[in-house]
Amino acid sequence: MNDEAYRKLSYGSIGPERMSESLDLRIQGMSCTACAARIEKAVGRLPGVHRVSVSYAARTAWISYAPDTATAERIVDRIRELGFEAAPPDQDDPERETAALRLRFAVSAALTLPLMWAMAHHYSFLQDMPVPALFMNGWFQLGAAAIVQFVVGLPFYFGAYNAIREKVFNMDVLVAVGTSAAFLHSHYTLFRGAASGGAEQPLYFETSAVVITAVLLGKLLESSAAVRALREAGGSGGTAASQATVIRAGQELRLPADQVRPGDDVLVREGEPLPVDGIVTQGEASVVEAMLTGESLPVDKAPGDPVWAGTTLASGQLRIRARAAGGATMVSRIYALVRQAQSSKTTIQRKVDQLAGWFVPLMMMLATATFAAWYVWLAPGDGERAMMSALAVLLAACPCALGLATPISLVIASGKLARQGVVVKEAGALERLALLDAIVVDKTGTVTEGKPRLTGMLAVQGSRSALLRNAAAAEADSAHPLARAIREAAAAAGLVPPKPAGASFLPGRGVEAAVDGRRFAVGNAAMADEQGWAKDERIAAFAAERERSGETVLYAAENGIAVGALAFADPVRPSSRGAVRRLRRSGLAVVLATGDREAPALAAAREAGIADVRHSMLPAQKLRLIEQLRAEGRRVGMAGDGWNDAPALAAADVGFAMGDGTDAAMGAGHIALLRSQLTGIGDALAISRLTMRNIRQNLAFAFAYNAVIIPFAACGMLKPWMAGTAMALSSVSVVGNALRLGPRLARLAGKERP
């Protein structure tokens, strides 16, 4: 696959290293976390590569690189040089590795069963079991064990060779060395007995075969669990329509969705998933956006409303002007962020990976010491006893359980959050989130809806309708939220504003235009004072009363004389009060920090149930507030709209970008809340705490297993095949506990909603 093909699956980002590309790959052939560390180390050394994060559990890699120095093709080639397969996620079957393991296990089990049957005569309580004579034949055992060792087990040798070539040790080295020693011991015993014609000696071909079979069983269960976790955690991936109905030159054409161009008109009918991001140009319909925002109720769409690929048309029919298709759609970028988070690592996981890097060579040294201790002191001269004890240590020791303790749980948690409209950009944010004890929230667009509404009018000359009609005309071309609220109120009242002429905008003040031949102006108190509008006492009283209640007031003037006033309020979201109560119940101190004036800030805080209010704050002051709280030893989260709060979002332990599914949510903070509601923070907090508890359980089991099983093996209380089987099953146990997280998170999502 050429570099351009990979680039289609990459997405740009701006980091401290200048413009970079990010490459998302699925990796096949890893046997343990040491393999993931080897890929990170080798690829990270390539010129132009900024950052590499490989997840053994998710079988994925995320690489950030400078396109003018490195290429995706060179990165993939380097991974293949290490002995692994790499491909873009959409061109790789995640179950392919599982299918190969299933075949290898079936062949290995079929050939190991006769060897285990022959082993029955080694135990007194099984000596009465009939054993076919063929199974007792040493040459038959040699043939069966050789196929298991050198055909079924050949990938272990390749993996060990590639690891040693890179001067590292992984699980393949342990398995290859341990099973080879067991096989060659029996091989030597068989040929020595045949050459001397002496008494038949006990053979242990079953040891190497059982270990390989057990390891393959563990790998098969582990791979199946990983695929299941990835499938359940897939979140938004793969949900957009693959085909689109495009209208060109008046004709309807069915095209692959990724061939739709920006500006194309796309027709979507009832029941169909939307194939592109775009703006509705014709039709009215209800759209289910649950896969994007987690909101199960359909959302009504009309001309001018934005829609996104992957959502589903519940009723009606829409004509959409395409803005993005294929990998550029919101759902694709969200899925890329989810995969990036699943490939990234927490602080705990990085420490475990460092420990795992030393684990294998340390265990090989311990196995050597065990052999020496038995041969010299515990059973002097008994080479067979010494070797069996050393093999048991070697086969019991594996860092896989440690390596799997964290990533499987994170994969499940990040996928669950994505389906609820909470996009975690890095695994470390999920870890830090569980430790938060304070949260700072912006007001506009976070606690409130961010969409001011006209709440009252006073007309001292003419009618209220005339005042609203003229104000809407003057504000016809303004993008200000208050101007939009005036136009929406006029439209709702059925008013048709006349076309203005000569409009002039005064930034931070207001607007003035010619309406029906008269100069009509709408502006704030500063504009009214600057232009000397003569205010009626009724207007001043109206303004004072409304401002005391936290509303914003604009004045209207005709030919320099004030003719009325309009009051606006930004409603607090209905969900905010319950969300704040839930956060406080979870042990978080909630602080409202806003650039708005004192009155509206206090009014919004009172309605939302927030006691600590900081008003009239500039972005730099919000940043200082975050730094101050952290200096006091608090673990602080920050929730804002993703643009003017960007410094505070970046400085917080966890930054929540409120975005309503917009680009702002993708560009700021550590976690994006697509629904722009504080309830998402409560969901993320509860899930993160449960996830970290699950990870601690996994780590405790993995450490306990090694602490118990290795001393037993070194003391000769475990046969090698028992140690190898226990090693394989330890990984399965950790994965099984991690998979318990999925149903628990599902129950939590339903129970914790305020």
Image: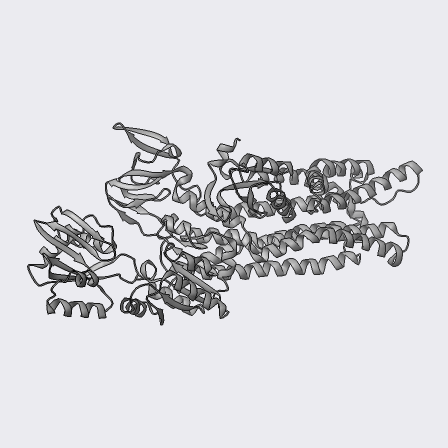
Q: Can residue 32 be seen in this view?
A: yes
Report the residue at 34% width, 64% height from top: 594
| Nearest the eye: 133 or 287 | 287
Q: Which quarter of the figure is the C terminus placed in?
A: bottom left
Location of residue 502 in the rendering, given as x and y in whole percent from the top left corner: 15, 47
Q: Can residue 747 be seen in this view?
A: no
Above or below, 273 against 472 in this view is above
Q: In this view, does 641 lie to the left or right of 168?
A: left
Location of residue 40 in the rendering, given as x and y in whole percent from the top left corner: 60, 45
Q: Is residue 539 left or right of residue 734?
A: left
Report the residue at 34% width, 60% height from top: 446
In terms of image quadrants, where is residue 563? bottom left
Location of residue 600 in the rendering, given as x and y in whole percent from the top left corner: 27, 66
| Nearest the eye: 580 or 4 | 4
From this viewpoint, which residue is outermost toward the left?
462
What colouring style does the render use?
A: one colour
Above or below, 583 against 240 in this view is below
Above or below, 161 against 519 in this view is above
Report the residue at 27% width, 42% height from top: 280
